[in-house]
Image (spheres, rainbow, N blue to C red):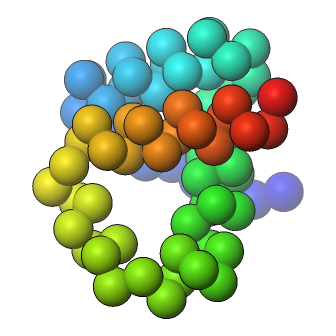
Amino acid sequence: MKRLEIELDEKTYEKIEQLAKTHHCKVSDLIKAMVEQLTQPEIMNDSSIGKWSNDAELVDEIMAEIVHNRI
């Protein structure tokens, strides 16, 4: 296992913590699920991915869907 340290704004951190609590998992599980989802071939080939950087709500929805699909 590798260790990763990141800095997040308070709002983003609170959202991640809430997602983890809601889905009874660790933050690292959320990140792993997000990476697995975002590296699917159909996602990697989608040119709209870069647009997500300005849409926090969309990213939240994606994260919720990822976690929901893992449960």
**Residue 39 sits above or below residue 63 on the image:** below
Q: Residue 25: x and y, percent?
A: 74, 22
Q: Residue furthest left?
A: 54
**Residue at 21% in and 68% down:** 51
In depth, the one of 67 and 32 nearer the eye is 67
Where, by quadrant of the figure, is residue 42 drawn?
bottom right
**Residue 22 sits above or below residue 19 on the image:** above
**Residue at 64% in and 83% down:** 41
**Residue at 52% in and 40% down:** 63
Q: Is 59 placed left or right of 22 in the picture? A: left
Quadrant where the N terminus lies? bottom right
Q: Residue 37: x and y, percent?
A: 64, 60
Quadrant where the C terminus lies? top right
**Residue at 75% in and 59% down:** 2
Q: Residue 17: x and y, percent?
A: 50, 18
Residue 64 in view (yes/no)? yes
Where, by quadrant of the figure, is residue 58 drawn?
top left
In depth, the one of 3 and 58 nearer the eye is 58
Residue 3 in view (yes/no)? no
Counting labels gives 0
Q: Residue 47: x and y, percent?
A: 33, 85
Q: Is 40 placed left or right of 60 in the picture? A: right
**Residue 60 sits above or below residue 43 on the image:** above
**Residue 41 sits above or below residue 37 on the image:** below
Q: Is 3 placed left or right of 18 in the picture? A: right
In depth, the one of 31 and 48 nearer the eye is 48
